Image (spheres, grey):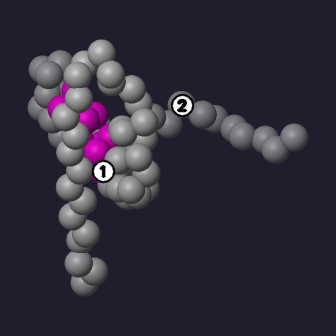
């Protein structure tokens, strides 16, 4: 079993000095699996806020046919 790497990053700035650079660096360090897990967690929280039971939703399957051109 692979040991999880814990990343801790913090910064303190004035709101007027805020930009996206720090957020981009943070999510790049986290890796793809962490970003997907965070996005999936937000989807579950969104459904709970909307009054649904919080069970993880299924992906939409509205595409019928994909053709390569």
Expressed as whole percent of the image width and height from the top left, the position of residue 35 reads 36, 49
Q: Are marks 2 and 1 in contact (CB under 8 Å)?
A: no
- SS of the residue at dot 1? helix
Q: Quadrant of residue 15?
A: top left
- Magenta range: 36-46
**Residue at the farthest top position:** 16
Q: Which mark is residue 37?
A: 1
The residue labelled by disc 2 is 62
Is the residue marked by circle 1 packed among few (<14), some (14-19), or many (20+) residues within 10 Å? few
Residue depicted at 50% across the width and 36% down the height: 61
Residue 21 located within the stretch drawn in magenta? no
> Seen in the image, is 33 located left or right of residue 42?
right
Q: Is residue 55 left or right of residue 69?
A: left
Task: Give the total of numbered labels.
Answer: 2
Q: Is residue 41 above or below residue 63?
A: below
Mark 2 neighbour class, 10 Å CA radius: few under 14, some 14 to 19, many 20 or more: few
């Amino acid at each position: 079993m692979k040991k999880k790497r814990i990343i801790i990053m913090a910064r303190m700035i004035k709101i007027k000095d805020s930009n996206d650079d720090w957020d981009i660096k943070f999510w790049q360090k986290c890796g793809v699996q962490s970003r997907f897990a965070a996005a999936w967690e937000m989807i579950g929280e969104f459904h709970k806020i909307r009054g649904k039971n919080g069970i993880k939703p299924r992906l939409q399957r509205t595409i019928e046919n994909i053709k390569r051109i």
